[in-house]
Structure formats: C-alpha cells, structure tokens
C-alpha cells in the first residue's frame, strides 16, 4: 500500500506542523507494516527548500521596519506572487507524481491538499484561520476561504490532533464523526527530567539565565504574548530579577505590537527573547524553567505544555478546550484575558514552593500517554478505514520481531 505524503512542512525550519509531519512519518515507518510511505518532496531536498525560503523572506515578519510603506507593500506583493507560483508548481509536481508512480492514498498533513487523483486524507490541526481570521495573514485567510470548502468536499477522511478540534470540525461543517479520527500528538525524543547541573551547563552554552519563567512558541497574536509581557512587566522587581521571562521562538505574522512593546519596555524589565533553539538543547531549557506559561487564546493541541510535563515541569495555561483536554488536572488554568488572575498566579508560582511541587506531581506520567507511536497507530487505523483494510495487531507483530 503506497501512501503519498506531502513532506514539505518537515523540510522547513520546523514549527508545529513540521514537527508533526516528520515525527509521524518516522513513527509510521517504524510500525513494520506493509505500507510504503512516498515522502514528497524527498527529505534530501531540505537544503534546497530552506535556501529557496530564505530568498523569499527578505525580513522577519512582525518586526517593525523603517522601510517606506510603498516599499513594504511592493515586497509583500512580490512575496505573495512567489508563493503562488511555488504553490502551483508544487501542485503540478504532486499530481504528476501520483500519475507516474501511483498511490493508494494521499495524506496532506498541512490542512489544504493538492488535487491528486486518489482518495485523500487531510490533517486539520485547528480552525483558527476560519474562526479568527484576524490572527492570520491575508493571503492565508484568502487561501482558506478559497480552498477549504473544496477540502471538505473532496477529502474522504480527516485527522485532528484532539477531540476538541474533531468536535469543532464536525459541528462547523456537518461532517459525520466517523469520517474524523482524533490522533493526539506525541513527545519529541530526548524530552525527560535531567539532572539540573547537566541542564544548566547547556544553558551556559546558550548564554541563557539559570532559571526563569518560560514561553515556547512563535510570537504571534494568537499566543497572547503582548498580554503576558504586560502582566510580567507589572510584577515586583524582586520577582523579575529572580525569574526572567524567557521567550523561545521566532517572530510570526502581525507581531508589530509585541515587537514594539518588547523593544520599548519588556527587554528593559528582564524579558529575554532567545529566538529558535535546536531540538537537542530544548530539554535543558524546559528542565530549568520554574514554570511554562501558555496564555494562548486558541490551540488545536498545544505541544509545549505536554513537553514541559514530560520534563517534569509545572504548567500555567489558558482555560481553553484543547489545553484542558490535553493537560487534564496536571496544569492550572486561567482566563486568557484576566490580568489579575495571571499576575496572582505568577507571584504565587515564584514563591509558593508547595504549590509548585503539587503542579509537578504526575506530570511525567500524564505526558507519557502521548507518543508518536500511538499517533502513528491511530493514523494507520484511519488509513485502514479509507481503504477498507482489516486492522492489524502491531503490538503482537513487534513483539514477535523482538522475540526473534
């Protein structure tokens, strides 16, 4: 059985969808089934893809620019044209690949599939573009407005990262629940509790403080980071001196307000922007954090809280459906617009060691329920539904291989 997978998200600098694509494909290949994943573009294209993307990006999105408005507008139009050309070209290559080599199923891991003459399955990570278009670039919103209804019509089956998004998708678009499979995401390799001296040695290499409050993710409106920085900057100096606010991640779209506040105020109040940190060092960053803060307005799953729990850490999160489903009773939740509640929580987590210990209890065990192998098993089950295959017992098969 040949499954054609759009592997492009995994070839860029990886955000959530890129990690999902790479980890899921690796886990599917490890199941030792008779499926043959046809990853296109091929993983060997990664240097070429990154080089092309770097040429398209002439500046970091979201960072205030001194360029004249007409110059910025011209650059934006040029970027949009280049993206459209690239998208059309890639769509042609996908259709050609399916014709020449053939596939039993096409899996699009990034929302909107290309036109391929085969049963199509799409992963819908969340509905934020449709429900909250103000959080996304105009070209992305336009693309979803143009193509999402066709995706709903043409796809045979859908995957979602949580039951929360599954319910949203079924309710918003009238899709039968049996046509949607929730496949909760997994934990990246190497994320676990570490000896603090070992973790702090990594922080020293990265030129980061030895303890801090942590946020991990792209800086964009949906993540509610302007609110978080404002709350943090209002804390007493003694708290900010003991626990800087470390923001790990790059600038996203429409982050001008966040960037301006960071430059004018936050960086002078012990807010540190580290940018991207390599995967092999991220476990140390989680381990040395006093707490992970996730005040997002909306998530489809929310990997950083689960990854923090895998490292034995404490989590304070916004009271939204995906966070509550994924983290359960292990995290503490607050309204993403309640300034006083977040301020009180930050003060308490800074000084209340007993509360801090209680938040960490059971975190590793809770995170242990999320694995890429289980995500792959759930995904393979969905493939079987689409292709009317009899289910296989992977556990017995793998045990037999090990016994041999």
Image (tube, rainbow, N blue to C red):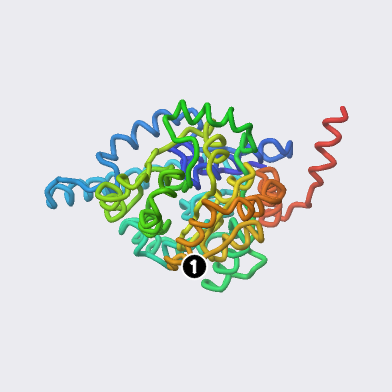
Residue 299 in view here: yes
Task: Give coordinates of residue 306: x percent, y percent.
Answer: 60, 49
Task: Give coordinates of residue 248: x percent, y percent.
Answer: 43, 42
What residue sits 62% from the left and 36% below the top? Answer: 189
Q: Is residue 230 above or below residue 174?
A: above
Residue on which the image places disc 1:
335
What residue sits 47% from the left and 52% below the top? Answer: 115
Tell me if mark 1 has few (under 14), some (14-19) or many (20+) residues whose alpha carbon lies within 10 angstroms of its own. some
What residue sits 79% from the left and 43% below the top? Answer: 394
User: Where is the N terminus found, in terms of image quarters?
Assistant: top right
Along the line of sight, the residue nearer the viewer: 353 or 290: 353
Q: Is residue 168 above or below residue 12?
A: below
Along the line of sight, the residue nearer the viewer: 129 or 150: 129
What residue sits 37% from the left and 60% below the top? Answer: 135
In the image: residue 71, left or right of residue 263: left
Along the line of sight, the residue nearer the viewer: 38 or 317: 317
């Amino acid at each position: 059985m040949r499954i054609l997978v759009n592997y492009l998200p995994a070839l860029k600098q990886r955000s959530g969808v890129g990690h999902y694509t790479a980890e899921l494909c690796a886990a599917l290949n490890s199941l030792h089934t008779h499926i043959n994943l046809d990853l296109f573009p091929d993983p060997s294209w990664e240097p070429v893809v990154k080089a092309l993307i770097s040429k398209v990006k002439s500046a970091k999105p979201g960072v205030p620019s001194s360029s004249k408005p007409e110059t910025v507008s011209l650059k934006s139009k040029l970027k949009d044209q280049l993206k459209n050309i690239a998208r059309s070209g890639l769509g042609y290559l996908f259709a050609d690949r399916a014709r020449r080599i053939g596939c039993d199923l096409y899996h699009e891991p990034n929302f909107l599939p290309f036109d391929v003459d085969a049963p199509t399955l799409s992963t819908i990570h969340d509905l934020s573009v449709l429900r909250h278009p103000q959080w996304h670039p105009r070209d992305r919103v336009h693309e979803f407005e143009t193509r999402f209804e066709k995706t709903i019509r043409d796809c045979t089956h859908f995957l979602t990262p949580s039951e929360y998004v599954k319910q949203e998708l079924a309710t918003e678009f009238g899709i039968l629940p049996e046509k949607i499979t929730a496949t909760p995401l997994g934990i990246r390799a190497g994320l676990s509790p570490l000896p603090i001296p070992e973790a702090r040695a990594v922080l020293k290499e990265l030129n980061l403080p030895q303890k801090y409050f942590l946020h991990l993710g792209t800086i964009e409106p949906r993540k509610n980071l302007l609110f978080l920085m404002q709350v943090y900057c209002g804390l007493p100096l003694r708290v900010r001196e003991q626990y800087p606010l470390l923001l790990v991640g790059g600038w996203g779209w429409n982050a001008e307000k966040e960037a301006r506040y960071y430059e004018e105020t936050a960086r002078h109040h012990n807010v540190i922007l580290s940018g991207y940190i390599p995967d092999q060092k991220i476990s140390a960053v989680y381990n040395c954090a006093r707490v992970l803060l996730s005040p997002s307005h909306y998530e489809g799953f929310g990997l950083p809280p689960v990854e923090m729990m895998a490292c034995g850490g404490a989590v304070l999160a916004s009271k939204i459906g995906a966070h509550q489903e994924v983290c359960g009773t292990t995290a503490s939740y607050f309204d993403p617009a309640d300034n006083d509640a977040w301020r009180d929580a930050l003060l308490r987590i800074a000084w209340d060691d007993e509360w801090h210990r209680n938040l960490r209890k059971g975190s590793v065990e809770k995170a242990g329920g999320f694995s890429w192998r289980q995500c792959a098993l759930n995904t393979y089950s969905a493939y079987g539904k689409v292709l009317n295959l009899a289910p296989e017992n992977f556990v017995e098969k793998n045990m037999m291989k090990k016994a041999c």
